[in-house]
Image (cartoon, rainbow, N blue to C red):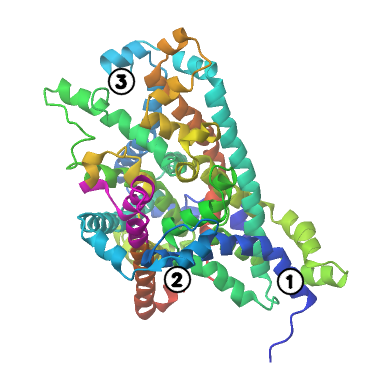
Amino acid sequence: MASVLAGHEEVTHRKLPAVGARLNRIPVAVNLVFSFIFILIAAICVIPVVFVLIISLSSNQSIQVYGYRFIPDAWSLNAYRYLWVSRSLVGRAFLVSVGVTVSGTLVGVYLNSAMGYVLSRKTFRFRKLYTWLIFIPMLFSGGLVASYLINTRLLQLGNTYWALILPIAVTSFYVIILRTFFQQTIPDSVIESAKIDGAGQHTIFYRIVLPVSLPALATIGLFLSFAYWNDWFLTLIYIQSTHQHMFPLQYVLVSIDRSIQFLTRSAQYLSGEDIARMPAESARMAIVMVVVIPIALSYPFFQKYFVSGLTIGAVKG
Amino acid sequence: MKRKATKDDVELIALALPTTVWYILFTYLPMFGIIIAFKRYRPIRGANFIVSLLRSEWVGFDNFRFLFATPDPAIMFRNTLLYNAAFIVLGILVPVTLAIMLSQLHSARLAKVCQTMIFLPHFLSWVVVSYFVFSFLSVDRGLVNRLLLTVGMEEVQWYLSPRPWPYILVFTNLWKGMGYGMVLYLAAISGIDGQLYEAAVIDGASKWQQVWRITLPMLRPVMTILFILSVGRIFSTDFGLFYMVPRDSGALISATQTIDVYVYKALMGMNNIGFSSAAAFMQSVFGLFTILTANFIVLRLDPENSLF
């Protein structure tokens, strides 16, 4: 399983011996039909992204007359120019998104891996108790109302960046993935000998366990960073509209959706002329692209880590 | 004989302390807070939430009784259960079929490229997806209405007519989720021992027989676990799908209001803690009950593959 996490595995194809594989292939005609079906499905999955990209590059005039089209009447970079002009809003939201993603990922990797390591120690006296501690929340949760009231009334997280970070920092599933990884890759003997050399568990964790577990930490880090980058729900719940400067990009999209005036209202630094020329339709789609492009460009490279993380999580034990 | 806690144990407790605190604050306190469904919650001046909650008056099942006097529970329970039933069936059928088909493609490169493209929607947020849907369904600008006009049909007020929404939501959910499922099953398929197929070929098994006799049985553990998990979540829905994608349109409530959407709206919109906590309580408790039942049934039928 360690080799799976290292991510060298080709998932797509079963490795059959060459001769057997050739004999056991589906007929050429069937392969053609299957290939066609998959090209079609793949296109359906990607076309909306391309479509919104095209809309963001369409001139406002073209949108108003012909609606959203795959081939606009006229192309225009106005939407992106507008985002640049209003960077006090969109740029700030971008920084909030990046900041929350980076700090959330760091906090999350630390919290998940510390618990994962503790659970992986077979000699730990309270191992059972702690296993239950992380297992029960997988079955039962207090629900939105109780969480909301405790986070806002008791913990006072409302309108703070902590509210965008802490509630989704730990996931029992990730703790289990890490526990499984530590169990399978770090021999007990290594830890025992470190103990004999006088190292405490903290030293062992930071000096030995974490450095050799980078692939697993990277996997969990990826899960977390995509979750933080894509999150809008925490902002919806915990950040009030009086605190617009704390909105991440995802939530800027939500609030534009709620009132198209959001852009104009917060464009107080812009001249009246700028506002009049604001390409409202394409600007929204341009923000969508700012959110999507980093993901679309990076996930193909990270895909294998996702797959290995999911696979290891499915291992019972 | 239980031994005493050693220095090692103390160090491990210390190492796990931040995460333990996290679990207590963000999962166990809310579990305890669920009693709010049986209270008439009133914040007490100067007292913290827990004290206010404990001192608030017990009202038994009043919140539930009042909630069920409205037409909302019937709609939201029906929607939640029916959508999840559709999602569970399609969520196994489609990804398993696609994974088996993809694993058979002659060109490894084509398979890889298609897999990557089909996986893309999984990485996008529901807010982004709601914009995609809007670009097709917008009344005056959307591609679909433009096409309808071109072929001489009347345009549809998509965000005001509930009837097509069950199909739209099921399709959107499948669109976003099938890549994830497919990748999981592909990983399981790649783990199947190739010798099984070799032996089958030597015995003259057709492709179809190989799928039914080897691939599907070998996928059963993964299918079972994913099935239990999704049955366990049958009272929960993806808030973003049902709230963001229909753009919170009031006209669509009959087709889009699920328990999660209702709880959110009752809490944040109507500020009705009684209604929202009663609905959230049922969601949590029924959810616990279903996951235990699903696991129990699998434990009886197929103990190897149960979740716990």
**Residue drawn at point x = 78 percent, y = 69 percent:** A191
Amino acid under disc 3: Arg
Circle 3 residue? A69
Most distant residue in the top direction: A273
Q: Residue A188 — which label?
A: 1
Q: Is residue B168 visible to the viewer in this orientation of the structure?
A: yes
Mark 3 crowdedness (10 Å alpha carbons): few <14, some 14-19, many ≥20: many
Residue A289 sits inside the magenta stretch: no
What residue is pinned by disc 2? B307
As drawn, the residue found furthest toward the bottom would be: B1
In the rendered image, the quadrant that contains the N terminus of chain A is bottom right
Q: Chain of mark 1?
A: A
Q: CA distance from mark 3 to mark 2?
A: 48 Å
Q: Which residue is pictured at 49% across the width and 60% down the height?
A: B191
Q: CA distance from mark 1 to mark 3?
A: 61 Å
**Precedes in sequence: disc 1 or disc 3:** 3
Q: Above or below — where is B118 with respect to A166? A: above
Residue reaching furthest to the right: A197
Is residue A187 visible to the viewer in this orientation of the structure? no
